[in-house]
Image (tube, rainbow, N blue to C red):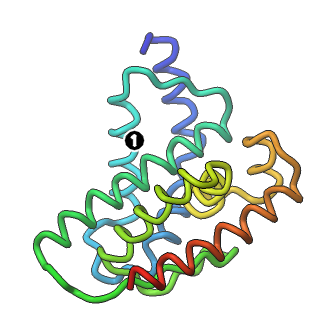
Amino acid sequence: MTMENRQELDDFYSLAYQELRRLASAVLRGDRASTLSPTTLVNEAWLKLAASRRLAVNSQLHFKRIAARAMRQVLVEAARRRQAAKRGSGLALVTFDDDLDAAESTPAAVLALDGALADLAKLHPRQAETVECRFFAGLNVPETAELLGVSEATVQRDWRAARAWLAVELHHAG
């Protein structure tokens, strides 16, 4: 990463910091046992991004999407550590409400969601990208449509289909 690109990445991070913290708060709200605070989650995601050698950011929306993916990775890593420390701690419940009000989640829930999203990405990559944009990046329908280069109606269809598919997968995983 050149110094010019590094400065651009720093600028995007500074502009998006408060929004990323708000999103991290919403994502972590349902996980009462989490050892991560919203600030820690955002900072850990930033460290992951800053360490990346081949990171190209095209726009602020694109940065949010990349940051959301990094936060997802941080959450999954934390869940794996917690799960390893405490095997068999219960079932997962993760919801995909448009207002990001999450039900209580556990390390198993985060891991189940990550696995289900990976499976969805194999079957319907755009639907998985829509979930990442909407749930993890907190993007609204028009922002998601712009980022993915599709219509708002397509985003809404993909969002509904992905939520339904994930609900079935997570129910079967539990």
Q: According to the image, label 1 marks what residue?
A: 46
Instruction: Say which quadrant the C terminus sits in.
Output: bottom left
Question: Horizontally, is 133 left or right of 90 in the view?
Answer: right
Instruction: Say which quadrant the N terminus sits in.
Output: top left
* Residue sitting nearer the eye, 19 or 85: 85
Placement of 173 over or under 133, stated as above or below? below
Position in image of residue 114 (x %, y %)? 42, 62
Position in image of residue 119 (x %, y %)? 48, 59
Q: Amino acid at mark 1?
A: Trp
- In this figure, what is the number of numbered marks? 1
Q: Secondary structure at mark 1?
A: helix
Q: Residues within 10 Å of mark 1 (few under 14, many from 20)?
A: some
Question: Horizontally, is 166 left or right of 51 in the view?
Answer: right
* Residue 143 visible in the snapshot: yes
Q: Residue at x 52, y 48 (%)?
A: 17
* Residue 19 visible in the snapshot: no
